[in-house]
Image: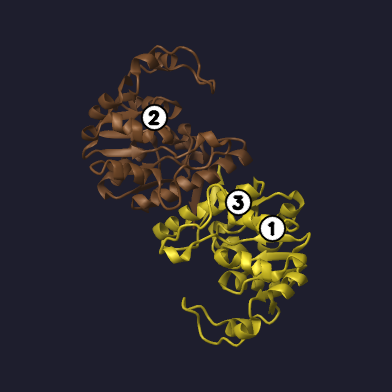
Chain colours: A brown, B yellow
Amino acid sequence: MRIGILGTGVVGRTLAGKLAERDHDVVMGSRDPSALAGRTEPDRMGNESFAEWYSKHPAARLATFAESAAHGQVVVNATAGAASLEALRSAGEDNLEGKVLLDISNPLDAAQGFPPPLFVSNTDSLAERIQRAFPRARVVKSLNTVTAAVMVDPSLVAGGDHAAFVSGDDDEAKEQVRSLLRDSFGWRRVIDLGDITSARGAEMYMALWLRLMGALETPMFNVSIVT
Amino acid sequence: MRIGILGTGVVGRTLAGKLAERDHDVVMGSRDPSALAGRTEPDRMGNESFAEWYSKHPAARLATFAESAAHGQVVVNATAGAASLEALRSAGEDNLEGKVLLDISNPLDAAQGFPPPLFVSNTDSLAERIQRAFPRARVVKSLNTVTAAVMVDPSLVAGGDHAAFVSGDDDEAKEQVRSLLRDSFGWRRVIDLGDITSARGAEMYMALWLRLMGALETPMFNVSIVT
């Protein structure tokens, strides 16, 4: 499948690397691909430079947001929540038309210290803002509830016995995302939370997730929903 | 142990019944105990009348909020979130002084339809409001993340293999609550999320919990935290 991934941070790289490995045709989108490709220093978090990562993952091509979105049959929003709407505007409404837009971002307000609060929550969500701004895209919220490494390889935690969620207004789009999660990443349990407003639940869970990361001293965990 | 339980709805009754069964000395607190004791009709949700419930659970005595709080070595806030601060003011600051105040309420805004949003979240929480209003009480948030039946009998879900949380500023108070959860209800895993601000996470999880209840078509579930 042709997949456009908007965002070249750890989350975008992790998804692009795994999807390319699974023989998808991946184009990553960046605001400024030539500047990014020339960056050879680790970032402030100590992550390897994009150039270094890119040299090991040549199958995932780098392009602009618009080229990446135009390429994808499915487009993934893997940008930081605070930058997502601007990135999607750069990607272009026409390039998103009718497509599944898998939104894995979180509306974290990084300027407010740690743990960060959300910049939208409770009576609205980032996924809903995106759906309203791009009514012809078929937005599905998913994967935002786990760290990047677990998104693409759930078996890293408890042998894969835990849950991902999907939220969205388009049942067929949710089914496509479920298939992608199952077939490309190995997710065995994906719970349909409901329409796009149910993304509030998945995003607000971040407030608990961040505290659990502190208590467990690792981001390598997830919730299993038991009955 | 002498326990005061503020609130006589399903949550208050469920806790009072189980704690009395476990030989704790329980006094339930109500705004108007004589009116409540005389109520013989089921409520709007179809729950049995308090009088009927009370006739089966004579060990849990009924009194005013103030008498209940004065009685308890531990005081439980099992009132509806929107009514909690008023109930605690009726209970009286002096009756809460130095005591563990176990807050199991959720700040649900029931006037806003279903699923209800929260009336406080993200940068504050109901538990923090209670701690600020009663600085001499030792507030511990816990048990608000499961339905009443599971609070007092975690074995009803997945044989008890799932997690409760505690949040609070007082480590000794949190330890007392952990002991109560373990010894009186059988909770095997109780995760300390951190100080009282971490109650934001436990309360905001309600937004996900409500959607999960819809997806699973039952409130009899919980999260197991897996690594």
Q: Which residue is mark 3?
A: B199
Spot occupied by residue A219 in the image (x, y as percentages of width and height) = 55, 35
**In 3D space, how far apart are the residues under numbered discs 3 and 2 (Cα atoms)?**
32 Å
- Which residue is drawn at the image coordinates 67% and 67% (left, top)? B89
Give whichever of B126, A176 is nearer the camera.
Answer: B126
Comparing labels 3 and 2, the label whose residue is closer to the camera:
3
Local SS, label 1: helix
Give the residue type at disc 2: Leu
Comparing labels 1 and 3, the label whose residue is closer to the camera:
3
Q: Quadrant of residue B57?
A: bottom right
Image position of B93 (left or right of A222) = right
Tags 3 and 2 both on a single chain: no
Local SS, label 3: helix
Spot occupied by residue B190 in the image (x, y as percentages of width and height) = 64, 51
Give the residue type at disc 3: Ala
Q: Which residue is mark 1?
A: B182
